[in-house]
Every structure is written in C-alpha cells, then in structure tokens.
Image: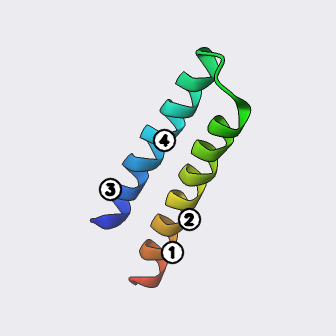
Amino acid sequence: MWSIVLMGLAGLLVGGALSFRQQQRPLWTQLGFYVLAGMSLLAASLLTFSGS
C-alpha cells in the first residue's frame, strides 16, 4: 500500500519539476524535485522487495 503512495508522490514531484522547468525557475529547484522523486521511488522499491 505504501509503495503505491510513494510512487504517486514521485509522479507528483516529477510533474512539479517539469512545471518549474516550464516556468524558467532556478535549476536547483528542479534538481531538488527530481532527487526527491528518485528517493521516493527508491523507498517504494525497497518496501516492495523487502516485504516479500
């Protein structure tokens, strides 16, 4: 259940990063969102594979 929530959060974070890119925001904000999305996907995968 939590892995699905974390994957959804990662999707929202990637969407936010793309939105910041379109708005010409600083690069560090985009990278921060991408890093957080990657961490969320990593946590989701760890939860999925450790739960079996």
Type of residue at label 1?
Answer: Leu
Seen at 48% across and 41% down, the residue is 13
User: At numbered mark 3, what does the secondary structure look like: helix, strand or loop?
Assistant: helix
Which mark, residue 13? 4
Q: With respect to residue 43, does 10 lie above or below?
A: above
Residue occupied by mark 1: 46
Give the SS element for disc 1. Answer: helix
Q: Which residue is mark 3?
A: 5
Mark 2 vs 1: CB contact within 8 A:
yes
Rate crowding at label 2 as few (under 14), some (14 to 19) or many (20 or more) other CA atoms within 10 Å. Answer: some
Q: Earlier in the sequence, mark 3 or mark 4?
A: 3
The quarter of the rendered structure image containing the N terminus is: bottom left
- Give the spatial CA distance, label 1 vs label 4: 19 Å
How busy is the neighbourhood of tag 1: few (under 14 within 10 Å), some, or many (20 plus)?
Answer: few
In-front residue for pair 51/23: 23
Q: Label 2, label 1: how many angstroms apart (C-alpha)?
A: 6 Å
| Residues packed near mark 4 inside 10 Å, few (<14), some (14 to 19) or many (20 plus) | many
Q: Amino acid at mark 3?
A: Val
Q: Which label number is shown at residue 42?
A: 2
**Real-space Cα separation, disc 2 to disc 3, in angstroms:** 13 Å
Residue 17 in the image: state x and y as whole percent.
57, 33
SS type, badge 2: helix
Between the C-alphas of marks 2 and 4, the distance is: 14 Å
**SS at mark 4?**
helix
> Which is more toward the observer, 32 or 51?
32
Residue 42 on image: x %, y %: 56, 65
| Side (left or right) of 10 relative to 33 | left
Picture layout, residue 23 above or below residue 32: above
